[in-house]
Structure formats: structure tokens, C-alpha cells
Image (cartoon, grey):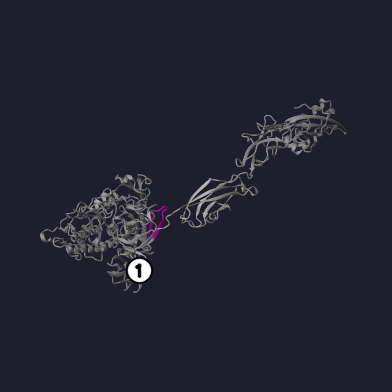
Amino acid sequence: MRQLRHDPLLWPSLLLLLLHRSAAAMSIPVALRLAIDEELPVGRQIANFRAELERQGHLLSSRGVEPDFRLFNSDPPGMGRYFRLDPTSGLLSMGRRLDRDSLCSEAAACCNSNEQCRTMLQARSDREWTYIVSLNLVVKDLNDNAPKWNVKEIVREFSEGAAVGDYRTIPAAQDPDSRRNSVQRYEILPPKPAEFDLELHETASSTGAGSSSAAVAASSGSLEVGGAAPLRLYLRHRLDRESRDIYRMQIAAFDGGFPTLNGTVWLVVRVADENDERPTFEKQQYEASVEESASPGTEILRLKATDRDAGPNGQVVYSIPAFAPARIRSLFSVDSDTGILRLVGSLDFERQREYRVTVVAQDLGGGSARQSDTQVLICLIDVNDEKPVIVLNSETDRLSVAENEPAKKTVTLMTVTDSDSGVNGQVDCSLTNHLDKFSLEQLSSKSGSAHYNLVTARSLDRETDSPTAGSIQLTVRCVDLGHPQNTAELTVPVDVLDRNDNVPMFAMAAYHFRVNERTQPGTAVFALTVEDRDEGKNSRLTFWLNGTTMFSIGSDSGQATLIQRLDRERQDRHKFVAGVRDQGEPSLSSTATVIVLVEGDNNHGPFVRDRFHFRVMEDAVVGHVIGRINATVAEQIDSSRLSYRIATESSDTSEIFRLFRLDDRDGRLTLAAQLDRELRAKHQFLVDVLDARDRRATTEVVVEVDDVNDCRPRFVYPSAGNSSLRIRPNIRVSSSVATLLAVDADDPKAGSHGNGKVRYSILSPPEETLPFHLDADTGHLVLVRPLPPSLLSGRPLNLRIRARDGGTPALESTETLTVTVSTDAEAAAAASDSSTTSVIDAPSKLWPTKVGGGGDRAEGAGSGGSGGGGSSDSLLIAAGLASVTCAFVLILGLGVGAIVCRRRCLVALTGQSHLQHHQHHQQSYQQPQHPQHQLLLGSGFVNGARLTSAEGRRQRCSPTAAVDFRDDAAAAEATETVPMTATSGKSRWDEFQPTRMLQQQQQLLQMQHQRLSAAAAAAASSSDGGGCSASASENEPNSPSSSNQQTDSGGGGCDCSRLLQTPQRQRQPAADCGSPASVRIELT
């Protein structure tokens, strides 16, 4: 407790203590003085009034009466709330937190120069004597506040032309503590810019008594404050906005307490611009060139000048000065804003070859604007100003080529002219699109003109190569060799003329319809849907029915009509054949089975909906429940007595019974054998539901097999037996050099990216280092840059190719393609050598095939054959092409008299056995209305063929397929056989149906057979003396087989009968149908 002492100098009274002794009290004044610190804790005792009064000799408890102390007044008012006074003991303690700085801000009068705060308390006692105690209370300051500014950032601005000594006023920091504890000095914190210093501006109020002057330490930037003088920021060095346009520094204020407290604020000084810089061009002199044929408005050059000033002082405008020659001003202009120098007149290289243009750059500084200039040297170029002109040597505007024509078929001749001379008139032409379908062959080339032949690159198919408009839009691009090059392009529409090569296909192999027996004759009961992808008369269709007298069909519409009354009790089902043929030459046709179920009005029999559709994954295990067939009955019939069975009218009944089990009690359909979507994607059959009275209802069940990615892509080219590619050394860039092919038996639409969709890539070397680009989708290998010297020198290039499907996880296969370049000498030797071996690729699109890998290869055909068949020689078209080619060779030899029976014609022919099998089955089966009973699979015809469960599952992803041959009546009745998948051609993976495939193969077989016989007859009739003759019987299905006879006139002839005849062979497993069939002809 602090000692109270008497203070005769009563400062404004803060507290009065009155003690009363009697009603007529005498007032005794007492003055006390007390000094305390601010921020004392609540409850802290600071004075004892009773003890102090007694110490001064005042009797407070006479006559046994205790004093009563009370606070009753304070100055300033409200100060009493900070204290507590015990009424009996007179102890004075802190009642709440006392902050001197807050108190001074509330009652400035009680503070003396912000150093100490004084107040007065008054107390009294209602007794005999009244003591009025005045307590002069001094609150001492603590350094509990740091200097601070009320803003986060102070911004000031100087002009870059400001004189040294110029200043800007800076607000002082605030510190509510007393003067000793308040701000004492300022400092610019490092790094301090040398251009600025802080000073105090001394005024009368700051230089009075008790204040000290400001002291500036230029080296440190520290400023000691002796009063409330304003703060100034002085400029000590000249500013240059172009060097530095903004300064950021921190100012710190330090107080005088211990420990010292400080506060900081950011000071930002912006330097305002003055126009003290002139525009500067990037170059002292510019050079540009322009073609003499450039048109007005052509941009020649973009000039750029910069001005380091800001605002309008730094904005630059460009102009050609008025003193420039009139010729210059008439030819050139410059954009005032962008500095682009443009041509505004016409140039002539022969008149003047160069121009010098002066361009001025000036800023927008107004009266103080500055400028500079530069020279532009413009050189004219004598340019190649004539473009090639492309002319088609055709009488019509549209070109055409028939589909299925062989490769290298001429479409038109093309002449290209260029009026320039020298290299500017030399032209090189190429196609920019459809490189896989057409190519340009250069016939001649010289300065000023060139001649080209537009030919087909392969056999075209109108339905796939031009499916929408029936034409292919080719773009021919011709470039001269001038500098810069001139380019001309011409769009050439080529119509692909249709041939009747598509069999009209029913939407379904077997149709099921329901007709009520009360239906009146003449009522349309159903319609058949057929697709023929040909056009014109080749797609005009004629319908017929065979095997029924109850229904008729519109020959053009396919709408079936009831022509006789139905009697369900007499016949509840009608099964017959519907057929359709097109009007092409020759006409193609197909058939489908139609089953009509006659419904009665008896509502008491079983009721079941018309169709149940189920889906099952192909890897589902045996016993998997596929679904349930639900039927209902009348109330009086027990539904538990219903029975279910697979109807015998179902397509391929034995296969259905092998794959599925139908519970005869509850109609649950379960899997009885492993499925294989690659063999068959959809199964359709009928189910009969019978009640206890043998009343029957029939429904159709469709089970679709969803694909699982279980087949990896298989390469057809390159492959183990054919992995080389030989190209010419002068092949042009952008030419397609090969088409790689890999096939995947999975569904290309299944999975997120297509289980059977194959994408190609080059694994090594990196494609960016190669002269080739491999199209990921089509497999086209295109030359994209000139052949490297290593290839031209004869060194082979091995490309590691990958084929990957889109399944999850993806499956892939790899093969190596060896690329070599033939030398000119090799090419010439190959052209002159009569024993050169040629390979003719048959169009595999004609024959849908099952694709996979593995299995035995077919044996070689014919005694003169040169080797086995191979995986790609299983198509009948190979036999046809081989025979026709051989006949052509013989005819050509007879015409020139050079190789008549002097050379042996050796044909490696693996597909020829198809011909004998075809003739054999024509003799065995006299059912022309069911051509689908005969199936071409691999290396022979298979009647009613089906893949066995074990072998088919094992070989389903292989190029060969195990076949179970059966010659039974069930096969003759089957409307569907082995489902096969097309690898190329018109049929898509998901569209192909077995019946449609068989029908199309039968039609094409007959056409090819006719062509073979005609070729053989032509070859025989053209032989003279020692030639070869051959004949083939093609329209005698009852004959044992087609016989090919050969006569040797003069004894010196050669026996060529083996060219068109193949010995009888045992039935073989299917050969590899994964790649195009080929015929190899060797002349020795």
C-alpha cells in the first residue's frame, strides 16, 4: 500500500470523504495525495483512509461510535466506478480495470500533457464530525501501446522532373501512451532508397518549452522526434521514371518505453511521367521483300518503335513524311497506330527493283512531342505468278468407274499445264484424299505440261466406299517447282457404278406370326422386311411364297394376305418359305422360313406373351439361369399343371437342345453348354406351353449372347509367312505403300471402346523417326517424308507393329514388317524376266468368313500345285481367278506364238476343291428352294455344318474352325447353320446372319462357276494345233461332277487339264479364312 501524505496543493478535487459527528456537524477538510500505476488488478488495496486520518491525529471512534465511510462525489464524474471503499475500515481498493490511456481519451482534462492522469474522490460519515477528505490521485502511465498508423499503406507521388529538396508530408504514427512512452523516432527500414529521406518540420508548437528539434541521420534514415512536429519525405536525388516508376519502402516508428515498442507502415512513392524520351525504332534500317504481283493492301512489314514514357507521352504514331517523293507516297502507306507498312499501288520489277521509304515515329506529348525516323529498304521479287491448270480429258463433267473392277483400272487421263518457264513450269501432282482407293500415275512431265493417269488403287465397292451419295470426291493437288510454289486443286467427283453384287437379305432367317382363325380372307396379316444395298433395278425386289395355299404376298410390297379361311382345329401352324429376288443381271435371291401360328377364341387355355427376350454373357457358366417363361391359365385350371417344352419347329433344334435346358414345370431357362458369341450371337426358338388338357400356346424366345473380350487380334498382314514389304525408290511422298490388316472375332460394338475394334500402332522404332505414318484406324501405311539414305542403300527397316482391340483389358498381337527398297536394276530385271512370280489378291469382301488362328492348313490342290493352301487360300474366288488367269496366260501365249505348250503352267491353287464340292452337293441335294443348306466354310462346302462344342470353343479365335459334318434330314430342314462373322466386305460384324451368308455365297458361287466355265471354253477354243482345250459342265446338277477334258493335238501338246480340275479329296477342317485368298502363277 502506498503511503498517503498531505498535499496542500489541491488539484481539481476527485474524491471527498465526509465524516459527521452530530446533526450540527462540523466539517473538517483533509487533503491527501496518492500515485498508482495503471492496469492494477481488481481488488488491489491502494489506500486506508481511517489509518491516515488517525495518523494525522483525528479521533474517529469517540463515544463508541464507529465512522461510516462513503464515496459520494468524483471529478471527473463517474470516476468512482473504478474504486471500492469499505464503509467501516476505510480501505480503498480497485473496483475495475483502470487504463490511463482510455481515461485520458475520455476525460482529457484530468491528464497533464499526456503524462499523468489526476482525479479526486470524496467520502463522508453521518456522525458527530464530518471529515471531508480530498484525495488527489495520480495514475502513472505504462508503455503498453505500440506506435501505429491507421492505414496499411501511404501513397505519395513525385514528378520525375521534381527538384531535389521537394517533399511530401507523411502522417505521424499514433501512440496513446504518455509523452515519454510515445513515439520518439522514425526510420526508413532497409533497403532504403537513396532518393528519399525523412525530416520533421519544426513549427512554433513543436519548438516550445519541453520540445527538442528534429535530428536527421542521412546515412541511416533515422529521425529522432522531440515534439509533435509533422513528418516530411524529402527528395535527395533526381528521379527517372523510365528507370524506376515506383518505390516501396517501410517506415518504422519507435516509442521511448522499455522495452521499446514499434510500428511500421508501407510507403509507396509513384513517379509521374514527363515527356523526356523520344520514340526508338527496333532497327536503324529495315529490309523487306515483296512480290511484284502483290496486290494493293498487301502487308509488307510491321514497324515498331517504343517510347519509354508513360501515358500519351509514350504513345507512338507512324507516318511517311510529307517531304517523301510522290512516287513513294503513291505506292506505300503506313498505319498510324500499328506501324504496318502496306502496298497501295502496283509494282513492276522491270521498272524499279527496290525502294527506300522513310517512316517517322512521333509520340503524343503535345507541345513537347518528340520523334525519330528510320529507313525501310523494299526489294521486289520476280515471282512465279502462274498457277498450274488441271484439265480432265473427259467428255463429261462426272467420272465413273464400275465397282468390283480390278485395281489399276483407268478412270481418266489428266493434263496439267503451267505457263511459267523453267522450274516454275514443272508440276508435280498427287491426291490428297482417298489414297486407299485411287492413285495418280505420271505418264510424262516437262516444263509447261504433265500428263497423268487416274487409276483405281484397288477394287471398289459402291456400298462401302461411297455409301451415301454414290460418288467419291477426289481432290487433286498440283504444285509447281517455283519459289514460292503455286498450288492448284481440283475436286473430281467419281461415281462408283453399281453392280448386282448384294443378295437381298431378309431381316430374319425365320419369321413367326400369329393370326386369329376368325381373320377374314383378304386381310393383310404380316409384312416382310428385306434389305438390298444395291441401287436402281439391282435393288428392285420381287417377293414370292412357296409351300402354302393359305397366304399370298404382294410381289412388290412384301405384304402377305390371307386368301383362305383358317381352321385352328384342323391345322394350328403353317410353315412355308418366303423368297425375294432382285432385278439385277444375274438376279440374286434369298429365302426365309415363315411360321404362322393360328390362334383361336378359347380363353381357357394357357396364355403367354408373344416373345421373351433374354441376354446372357458368353462366359456364363453351365447351369446359369437365363430367365423364366411365365404363362397363365383360367382360374379353374391348376397353373402348376402347365408344362413347357422347346418346340421342334425351332431353327436348328439340335443345337438349341444342346445349349439350353427348359424346366418343364416352372419354365426356367438355364444354360446347358458353354456359349460362344463368335460362333453365334443370337439364338431364336419356339416354346410350347401346354395345360392339363393339352391345349397349347406358343411363344418365341430370343437369347442374345453379349460379347466378352476373349479373342485377341490376329494379323493377316503382316504374318509369319508374309512379313515383307518391297517399295520402289521413286515412290512419292503421301503415297500409301501398304494396308496392314488384323482381325478380331469379338464384337466391335461391345465394351466401352469395342472389343473387336482393332487399332494399329508402330511400337519400334519411334514413329517420329520414320518416313512412314500408320493410320491407327485403317491400317494404311503412308509415306510422309522422303525415304532415308539407309533404306535407299538397301538396308532393311524392321517395323514392330501392334494391333490392339478396345476391350477391357485390351488384348493385342504384334508382328514385324520388314521394309526394303528395290534398286533400279532389280526393277528392270524383274520387268524383263519371264519367270517372274506374280501374286494376284482376290477380293475377300465377297466371302464372309470365320476368323481366328491355329488349326491345320489345307493340302495343296492338284498334281501340279506348288505347295499347300495356306491360311488365306480358302475362298472359291481364288479358284476362279486362278483359272481365268491361267486361261488368259494361255491365250496370250497362243497369240504371240512364244509359249505354246513349250512352258509348263503351274498353278498353286488351294481353293479349287470348292468347285468339286459344289458340284457334288448339287448332285446330292435336289432342294433349289433351300440354297442355305449348303455352307462354304474354309476349304470346302459343308452341308448343314455346325461347330462342335469342344473343338469350336478351342478354335473359335483361330484362323481354322473344327467342323462336325452331318448329312441328315435335320440338316436339310435347318433354316440356320453355323453363324459366321465377316472380316471384310459389305457385312458388318453385328449384322451378319448365317442364312444371309449362305444365300449370298450360293448366288456368287453360281456366277463364279459360269465365269470359270466360260474362261475355260475360251481357252480351249483359242488353242490351235498344240494348244490346250478344256470344257466344264456347269448346269448339270445330276452329273457326277463337272468334267474338264483336254485334247493333245499332234502329240506335242501339254496336259493342262489340272488347271481346271482338282482330284477328289477328303473333307478337311476349315482353312484359315482370315486373310484375302491369293493365286500364285509361275511361268518357267
Mark 1 surroundings within 10 Å by alpha-carbon count, few (fewer than 14), some (14 through 19), many (20 or more): some
Residue bearing the label numbered 1: 526
From the viewer's perspective, tell me whether residue 214 is left or right of residue 1014: right
Q: Residue furthest front?
A: 351
Q: Residue furthest right?
A: 24
Along the viewing direction, whichever of 705 and 309 lies nearer the viewer: 309
Say if residue 575 shows up in the picture: no
Which residues make up the magenta segment? 473-490
939 vs 607: above or below? above
Q: Does 482 lie within the magenta span?
A: yes
| The quadrant where residue 902 appears | bottom left
Q: Does 928 lie within the magenta span?
A: no
Along the viewing direction, whichever of 1061 and 158 lies nearer the viewer: 158
Amino acid type of disc 1?
Phe
The secondary structure that dominates the magenta segment is strand
Say if residue 767 shows up in the picture: yes
| The quadrant where residue 537 appears | bottom left
Q: Secondary structure at mark 1?
A: strand
Residue 1004, horizontal then vertical, whole percent: 26, 62
